[in-house]
Image (spheres, grey):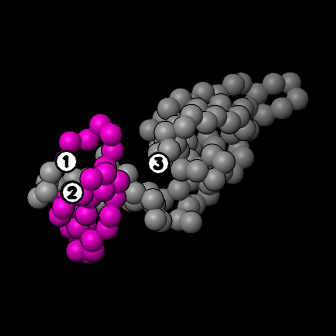
Amino acid sequence: MAKQQTEVRELQEGSYVMVDDTACKINAYSTAKPGKHGSAKARVEAKGVFDDKKRSFSQPVDAKIWVPIIERKNGQIVSVDGDDMQVMDLETYETITMRIPDDADVSPDENIEYLEMEDQRKIV
């Protein structure tokens, strides 16, 4: 899995983080002051990039955490067949099959932007 390690204090809203081995986008990030016997804590609320489930965690700000490497790519829709579509990557000219999101209205020869992490893809 394409990921790297960073400290919790370096996270910010809008960036990505791994929660329960799932790539998530951070919706809310807050910190609490250090107490008498402990270090500062960070509370992170995130939403899954590929499954849209809400997740959250709380850790010390100096703890290490995994951050996924998600690539943003451009593609062109080659064909639409039911709930699936064929998309050609505009850099590698590789053709991939993607599921059409419920809220998307797509047609052949349309250019799209999508997120890719390993074998997972999602239209932006």
Residue matched to label 2: 80
Residue 106 — which label?
A: 1
Q: In this view, does 62 lie above or below 29?
A: below
Query: In percent of the image, x 25 and y 67: which residue is there?
Result: 89
Q: What residue type is labelled 2?
A: Val
- Regarding residue 81, the answer to whether it shows in the image is yes
Q: Give residue 52's position: percent from left, percent from top.
A: 49, 39
- Regarding residue 74, the answer to whether it shows in the image is no
Query: In percent of the image, x 56 and y 34: which residue is there?
Result: 54
| Tag 1 secondary structure | loop
**Mark 2 or 1 closer to N-term?**
2
Quadrant of res 55: top right
Residue matched to label 3: 50
Q: Is residue 28 above or below residue 91?
A: above
Q: Give residue 60's position: percent from left, percent from top.
A: 73, 38
The image shows a total of numbered marks equal to 3
Could you classify mark 3 by the number of other residues whose Cα lies within 10 Å: few (under 14), some (14-19), or many (20 or more)?
Answer: some
Q: What residue type is labelled 1?
A: Val
**Mark 3 or 1 closer to N-term?**
3
Alpha carbons under labels 2 and 1: distance apart: 8 Å
Q: Is there CB contact under 8 Å for labels 2 and 1?
A: yes
Alpha carbons under labels 3 and 1: distance apart: 19 Å
Query: In percent of the image, x 56 and y 66: which residue is there?
Result: 1
